[in-house]
Image (tube, grey):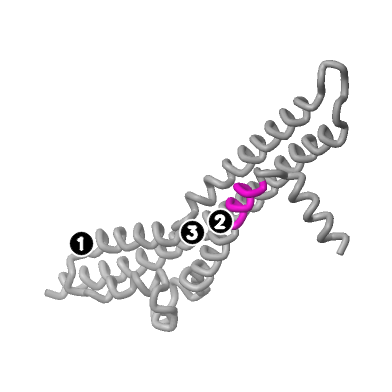
Amino acid sequence: MNHWNELSETARAAGWVLYPLTALAVAALAITFDRAYALWRFARVPDTVGDDAGFVHALPREHALRRIAPLLDNRAMPLVQLEARIEAAALRIEREMSRGLWLLETIVTAAPLVGLLGTIVGMMHAFRLIGGDGLVNPSGVTGGVAQALIATALGLVIALVSLFAFNYFARRIDRLMDDVGIFANERLAALRVAAEDGVATQ
């Protein structure tokens, strides 16, 4: 029970800045869970990439590699056009996997600034209570200082969590695009060899 009382007192001391910070925290958590699920469901790449291509059909329908594989099955398409379509599909996959990360990156910068704004407002409130004759309201001054410190701390915590999440997702997407490139290049190389063999036998 004491913990809930401490939390409520902390929230009361943070003042109005708690509302925008809560909105930023909720947005950051929503994006984090959404991107974590998307990367887990549609971007996990088996260790068999580069071996037998049959594993692709066991992947989920919206998986990145499964979206590339049908393009490589079109043997009648010229290789130049096939490469262009694969590149366009890879760009679409990267854009979809990165959805919402711009907001997460914005929260990394915005949360400390909102906390800093709360700090400035809290300190202004504390100093306003100090009159020309000295300290007028000690409890009001300490409350303003508490609001300033809590706002700063909350902003920094939200920014740190968002920063770690953003960097992790960016690294995972880079790795996914590398795997997509490896998968496509190896299949394209096999198609080039087959096309050259076909020309040589004619």
Give percent across and percent down for residue 62.
39, 74
Q: Give the left or right position of residue 31, taking residue 130 as reference.
A: left
Marks 3 and 1, the one that precedes in the sequence: 1
Between 149 and 37, the one nearer to me in the picture: 149
Q: Which of marks 1 and 2 is in front?
A: 2
User: Which of the 4 quarters of the picture holds residue 133?
Assistant: top right
- Tell me, for residue 81, which label it has, or none: 1
Between 74 and 100, the one nearer to me in the picture: 100
In the rendered view, tell whether residue 191 sits above or below residue 99: below
CA gap, disc 2 to disc 3? 20 Å
Query: Given contact means CB atoms under 8 Å apart, are the residues at marks 1 and 2 in contact?
Result: no
Residue at the disc numbered 3 = 173
**What residue is shown at x 21% (from left), y 70% (from top)?**
195
Residue at the disc numbered 2 = 27
Image quadrant holding the N terminus, namely: bottom right
User: Which of the 4 quarters of the picture holds residue 16?
Assistant: top right
Give percent across and percent down for residue 92.
34, 60
Give percent across and percent down for residue 58.
43, 83
CA gap, disc 1 to disc 2? 41 Å
What amino acid is at disc 3? Ile
Q: Give the left or right position of residue 65, taking residue 151 as reference.
A: left
Q: What stretch is highlighted in magenta?
A: 18-27
User: SS class of the residue under badge 1?
Assistant: helix
Q: Does the magenta stretch include residue 66?
A: no
In the rendered view, tell whether residue 116 sits above or below residue 161: above
**What residue is shown at x 81% (from left), y 38% (from top)?**
143
User: SS class of the residue under badge 2?
Assistant: helix
Marks 2 and 3, the one that precedes in the sequence: 2
What amino acid is at disc 1? Gln
- Tell me, for residue 197, which label it has, or none: none
